[in-house]
Each structure stands twice: as structure tokens, then as C-alpha cells.
Image (cartoon, rainbow, N blue to C red):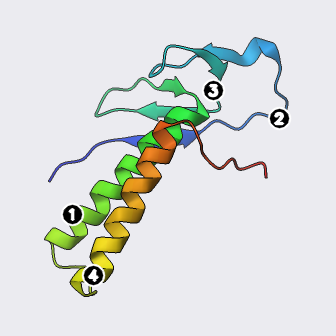
Amino acid sequence: MKNKGMLDTKLTVKISLSCCRKCALSGLSRVCRHRIKLGDKGSYYYISPSSRARITAVCNFFTYIRYIQQGLVRQNAEQMFWEVMRLRREMTVAKLGFYLTDQS
């Protein structure tokens, strides 16, 4: 399976209104501290924290499913079921706009 994608956190020391960009995924003007590189293209797209949370949740879900298919998960069926449900909940919560920030 060929999966290409990279998330990068752009480190900024101070945030001002001038650093608000249009999020490449949502199209909204937000503070975009993260950027994403898709495939082999050399360009990065700036994304908002909420968009990053959505992408991360989906990637976590599909990574776990792939691990199950490859036989790398050593749990019984019920434990795998509840982990899949937790990951699905994480995707739903991120889709609703709730996510944890690094600045707690």
C-alpha cells in the first residue's frame, strides 16, 4: 500500500493577525501553524488546527485498520472492536470541531 502524506508544524514565536492564512482545506481564514505536503509535490499547504485534527484522526483510524489486516494487532476481537469505536469517536469529535491543543 502506498501512502504519501506529511504533516509539519510550522514553529512561530509570536502570533499576530498578519499570520492568519486561508486554510487550504476549510477555506476559512485561521491561524495556520501546520502545513501538509501531499504526494510527491514540493509544495506545502497551510492548514488550521481543526483541519489537522481531522486529518490526524482519519490517519490514526486507517493505520489501525491496516495493522489489523496485516495481523500486527495481538488483541481479541472485542478489544479490537472497542479500539475501532474509540477511533471512530475521535474522528467524529474532530469533525465537530473539538480537538486538543498543544498549548494546554
Q: Secondary structure at mark 1?
A: helix
Work out whether mark 3 precedes mark 1 in sequence or the reverse, and give the earlier one. Answer: 3
Name the mark nearer the viewer: 4 or 1: 4
Can you identify the residue that label 4 sits on? 78
Name the mark nearer the viewer: 3 or 2: 3
> Image check: 30 left or right of 42?
right
Can you identify the residue that label 2 sits on? 13
Q: Which mark is residue 66?
A: 1
Could you classify mark 2 by the number of other residues whose Cα lies within 10 Å: few (under 14), some (14-19), or many (20 or more)?
few
Work out whether mark 3 precedes mark 4 in sequence or the reverse, and give the earlier one. Answer: 3
The residues tagged by marks 2 and 1 sit, at their Cα atoms, a distance apart of 37 Å
Where residue 37 appears, as percent x and y from the top left, is 41, 33
Can you identify the residue that label 3 sits on? 32
Where residue 19 appears, as percent x and y from the top left, is 73, 17
Could you classify mark 4 by the number of other residues whose Cα lies within 10 Å: few (under 14), some (14-19), or many (20 or more)?
few
Q: Secondary structure at mark 3?
A: loop
Work out whether mark 2 precedes mark 1 in sequence or the reverse, and give the earlier one. Answer: 2
**Labelled pair 2, 4 in contact (Cβ < 8 Å):** no
Where residue 10 appears, as percent x and y from the top left, is 64, 35
**Above or below for 31 versus 5:** above
